[in-house]
């Protein structure tokens, strides 16, 4: 027997043993592992809490960025792309990763400093911040703007929008 046949037999026997185990597994155990409770934040009137609007914004931004990153990855791995195009794609990927890190950093800093859940989106020199807060406090908005602007040397255009929880 050669090595290839030996590996094939070993993997095949492993798959066979696992499939027999899966078939003979008690149904109660199988159902308990697949039907875990998924927690949801639902208010008494049946509406999902406002915090989920932040999650929806994050998911939307993540999908948008992921699509952009996928195209850049394709450009990086493309054989027909020039070295300059590959370099530009790499720099854009690096920039997008830095943006994600900064956005998360600001969200955590706002939560830590002011106890407010927020969503931060950075787009070149524009920074959009959505905060979940009952009161639309201008001093809180100014403090958040100062917190974010303190990391930049250049003037950034920062907007803070409040949503009620």
Image: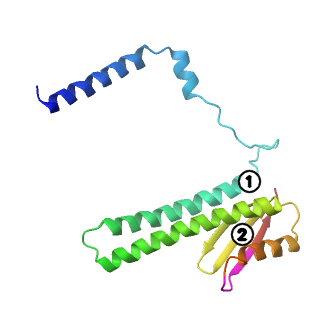
Location of the N terminus (image quadrant): top left
> At x 51% / y 65%, what residue is drawn?
65
Give the residues in magenta.
153-159
| Disc number for residue 1 | none
Q: Nearer the viewer, residue 151 or 125?
A: 151
Q: Nearer the viewer, residue 45 or 118?
A: 118
Q: x%, y% of residue 91? A: 44, 74
> At x 62% / y 59%, what residue is drawn?
58
Q: Nearer the viewer, residue 134 or 79?
A: 79
Which residue corresponds to mark 1? 51
> At x 27% / y 28%, what residue is drawn?
11
Q: Is residue 131 above or below residue 28?
A: below
> At x 65% / y 79%, what residue is drawn?
126
Task: Tell whether 121 sits left or right of 150.
Answer: left
Let me know if residue 155 is in the magenta part.
yes
Q: Is residue 67 above or below residue 5?
A: below
């Amino acid at each position: 027997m050669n090595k290839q046949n030996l590996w094939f037999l070993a993997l095949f026997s492993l798959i066979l043993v696992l499939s027999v185990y899966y078939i003979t597994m008690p149904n109660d155990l199988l159902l308990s592992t697949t039907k875990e409770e998924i927690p949801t934040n639902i208010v008494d009137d049946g509406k999902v809490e406002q915090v989920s609007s932040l999650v929806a914004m994050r998911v939307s931004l993540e999908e948008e960025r992921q699509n952009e990153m996928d195209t850049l990855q394709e450009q990086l791995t493309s054989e027909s792309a020039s070295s300059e195009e590959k370099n530009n794609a790499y720099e854009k990927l690096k920039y997008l990763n830095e943006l994600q890190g900064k956005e998360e950093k600001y969200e955590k800093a706002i939560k830590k400093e002011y106890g407010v859940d927020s969503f931060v989106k950075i787009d070149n020199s524009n920074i959009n911040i959505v905060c979940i807060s009952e009161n639309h406090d201008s001093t809180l908005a100014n403090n958040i703007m100062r917190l974010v602007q303190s990391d930049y040397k250049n003037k950034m255009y920062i907007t803070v929008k409040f949503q009620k929880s």
